[in-house]
Image: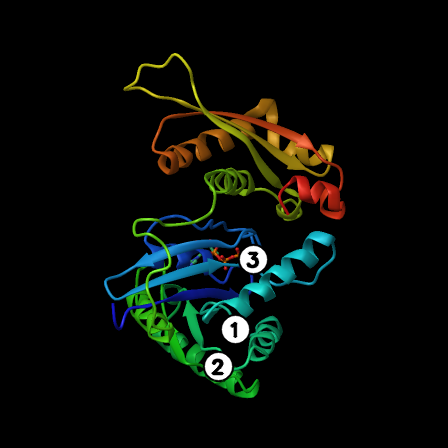
């Protein structure tokens, strides 16, 4: 298999830069979790791109942020470890935002990796005019120079419109080392099913809630079991899961008036879980308060951190 390339790449960028959406666009299936709320990506979900000439494994990392809790510190450690381990870094800069201090800080951090190929990606180009895209590309170029970070490429893309996503894949593949495929073909992610299911529920729970909630939410899937006594051609899976929040007031928000929000969360996530599992699902969802779980190492472990 001479000439075959395989390796890892990850996206870096400020919250909401479009990293998850672009991961999905590259992989072609929904494996990473997107949400209109910042900083919702918590697990390093790998999406696989299989091609005749290459295999690209995309690692989606949470955003780096000012750590205020034990969870925050662990997330930052996880991010830096991921950056150090991948073959190529893709840095995202949304075209509808100017390069700011947060971006410069990230560029500085990535520049410290040395000699790793870094591709700059101007995301969300569908939201702005071609002139603005041009301006944005120049600003990205200048910011790289300032930090002494030579971009391998600067690529404008729109994950939503599908513009230049294939080109980006080509350019990333070029940076990967030669080697055989690392994962069996057809596999899209190596996350355990429970984690994917938990992330789907978490995403549904986060839709339309107030700003303080995202960091306080964790979802644990207790079990996924086939319902007994079902006809063979009509299987049903029972999925039992808990949504953990930090305070009683948050529990109220999640449950909603007469349970309306929780029901909505269930309906939204059930459809997607059925797609992941390929089987009709009965979802049993409970909300629990785990006081200040982000500051408590014992609880963090229980919740999988
Ligand atoms: N119009 C447009 N919107 C986009 C595009 N890519 C992402 N978005 C939107 O931007 C928002 C953030 O996208 P995400 O992919 O969740 O961003 P992220 O960088 O993974 O965010 P965090 O997980 O918070 O770090 C979502 O509402 C997306 O729908 C794009 O190419 N065009």
Q: Is residue 111 left or right of residue 178?
A: right
SS under mark 2: helix
The reply to whether the residue tagged 3 has its Cβ within 8 angstroms of ligand 1 is yes
The one nearer the camera, 174 or 182, is: 182
Q: Position of residue 160 (x, y in %)?
A: 35, 57
Q: Are marks 1 and 2 in contact (CB under 8 Å)?
A: yes
Q: Is 171 located above or below residue 202 in the figure? A: below
What quarter of the picture does the N terminus occupy? Answer: bottom left
Q: Is 293 located above or below residue 39 in the figure? A: above
Identify the residue shown where x is 33% and y is 67%. Answer: 169
SS under mark 3: loop
Q: Quadrant of residue 113?
A: bottom right
Q: Residues within 10 Å of mark 2 (few under 14, many from 20)?
A: some
Disc 1 target residue = 98
In the image, which disc is placed on residue 139?
2
Q: Is 30 located above or below residue 181 in the figure? A: above
User: How are the residues colored?
Assistant: rainbow
């Amino acid at each position: 298999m001479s000439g075959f390339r395989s390796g890892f790449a990850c996206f870096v960028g400020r919250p909401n830069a479009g990293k998850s959406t672009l991961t999905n666009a590259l992989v072609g299936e929904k494996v990473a979790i997107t949400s209109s709320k910042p900083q919702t990506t918590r697990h390093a979900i790998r999406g696989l791109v299989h091609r005749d000439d290459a295999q690209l494994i995309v690692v989606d990392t949470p955003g780096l942020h000012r750590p205020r809790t034990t969870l925050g510190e662990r997330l930052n450690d996880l991010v830096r470890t991921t950056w150090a381990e991948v073959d190529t870094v893709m840095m995202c800069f949304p075209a509808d935002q100017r390069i700011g201090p947060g971006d410069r800080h990230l560029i500085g951090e990535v520049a410290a990796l040395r000699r790793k190929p870094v591709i700059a990606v101007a995301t969300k180009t569908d939201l702005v005019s071609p002139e603005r895209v041009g301006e944005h590309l120049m600003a990205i170029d200048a910011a790289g120079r300032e930090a002494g970070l030579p971009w391998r490429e600067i690529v404008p893309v729109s994950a939503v419109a599908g513009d230049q996503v294939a080109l980006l894949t080509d350019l990333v593949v070029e940076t990967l080392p030669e080697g055989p495929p690392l994962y069996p073909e057809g596999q899209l992610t190596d996350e355990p099913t429970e984690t994917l299911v938990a992330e789907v529920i978490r995403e549904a729970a986060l839709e339309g809630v107030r700003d303080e909630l995202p960091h306080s939410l964790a979802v644990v899937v207790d079990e996924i079991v086939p319902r007994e006594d079902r006809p063979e051609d009509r299987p049903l899976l029972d999925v039992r899961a808990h949504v953990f929040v930090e305070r009683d007031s948050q529990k109220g928000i999640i449950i909603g008036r007469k349970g309306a929000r929780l029901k909505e969360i269930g309906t939204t996530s059930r459809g997607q879980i059925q797609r992941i599992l390929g089987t009709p699902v009965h979802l049993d969802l409970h909300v629990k308060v785990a006081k200040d779980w982000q500051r408590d190492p014992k609880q963090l472990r229980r919740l999988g951190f």
